[in-house]
Amino acid sequence: MSRFGGLKATKQDAVLRRAQPHRRPPRNLSSATGLSLRENGLSELREGHFTGLMQLTWLYLDHNAVELVEESAFERLRRLKELDLSFNRIESLPNATFRPLPNLRILDLSYNRLQALEPDLFHGLRKLTNLHMRYNALKFVPVRIFQDCRSMQFLDLGYNQLQSLARNSFAGLFKLTELHLEHNELVKVNLAHFPRLISLRTLYMRRNKATIVVSTLDWTWHFLEKIDFSGNEIEYIEPHVFESVPNLKSLQLDLNKLTYIDQRILDSWTSLESIALSGNEWECGRNVCALASWLSGFQGQRDSTLLCASPDTAQGEDVLDAVYAFQLCEDNAAAAAASDVTTRANAFTKDGARGNAYGGPSRGPSDLQDAEGGLAVTNTFAVTVSTDDLESTMQIHKVVTGTMALIFSFLIVVLMLYVSWKCFPAGVRQMRQCLSSQRRKQKQKQTMQQMATMSAPEYYVDYKPNHIEGALVIINEYGSCTCQQQTSRECEV
């Protein structure tokens, strides 16, 4: 079986190994459908080297020392479907190198020394499905270089030195499903660089030097399911970026410099099944609440721990543990601050210009160039970081906690009284009767005291006997006398 899953070798195929090294391709193999010249020390491919091999459908020339490839080296190999030129020393290829190969499906140029691509190098390769160019020294991709490659499904440009991409670098790749751009030197991720890639499913951009992720194109990638942005220097992501990939299932953002995730971004992650966020510089303050809430409800696969980078009191702690331990997300002021940060972040303009939106210390603006059709566009932005006074927040929480404790104690007392009344109604009635009896007795006592203080009417007898009557009364105990009732003392004046 061929290296790329191509045609199976037959008896007429020629496989020449190092046991019989050749400096040039063999002749008299006109009926061969496949030829492998791996590890044969070939140093150049010139016109006429493959004369008479018109039946070839695959040709392996990898692991040689090829430095020179002439423009007509593959003349008359119209049936060729697989060509492997990897692990050689090729620095450049003529513009029409592959033009005689209209049926080429798989082309491997990886592990060479290519520094630039001619603008029409892949012209006419309408059946090309796989193109491998990793581990070269490419610094840019010419505009519309893949315009004719409308059947391409796999493109690997990883491990090169790409610093920027033109908006139309990948024009014409309507069937492309997998794009590799990892291990380059791209300083910005702009989804506008991939317009009309309507079939794209996987995008690899790990290990670049990107600091921001933006999208300056109103386009939706309905089939894009996996994005790998890990190992960059990303500090800011435009809030609307992931709204253009509604069916995203896997996202790698680990090993970057993110400090928070905007609420609008979290709201757009509705289809995610796997996410990696570890190795960032998470600020465990007010801005982390939205991310903590989202992670608590996420049911898919994610990192086991996300560690806080600031403030010092929470450094090294797990994000979720810090949120619950310091009660960062229970303060209304914290929620308002997070909302304010979200609103201001939306002020980031589409062309990348961004001011000091957070009102805190900001980094100096840096200019990034975006090549578009040969034109340089300069975007200025400033990444800002908001800080919080953790000690002040703790004092507020202490006051709130004390107040809540007092209220709770009062409610407990009320509850105990209520329970006593419900559980011991006879005792309560007896207590009421006792209190009523005491009040009656006290009232009777007060009444008796009032009656006792009132004086009864007094009667006085005025007796004035004469001398004779007085003697008779004394001796014989009889005599007449007159009595006169006087008014009571209360009536006297």
Image (cartoon, grey):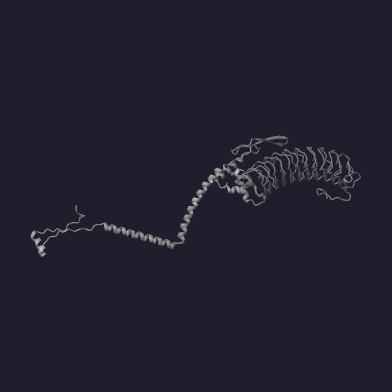
Quarter assignment of residue 124 = top right
493 lies above or below 145? below
Left or right placement of residue 339 versus residue 56 in this view: left
Is 239 in front, or is 55? 239
Residue 61 image position (x, y, % from top left): 84, 44
* Residue at image coords 80%, 44%: 107
Is 151 in front, or is 452? 452
* Residue at image coords 53%, 45%: 396
Quarter assignment of residue 170 = top right
- Camera sees residue 479: no
Q: How many marks?
A: 0
Residue 419 image position (x, y, % from top left): 47, 59
Is 368 in front, or is 167? 368
432 lies above or below 292? below
Quarter assignment of residue 451 = bottom left
- Camera sees residue 411: yes
Residue 113 image position (x, y, % from top left): 80, 39
Left or right placement of residue 473 versus residue 142 in this view: left
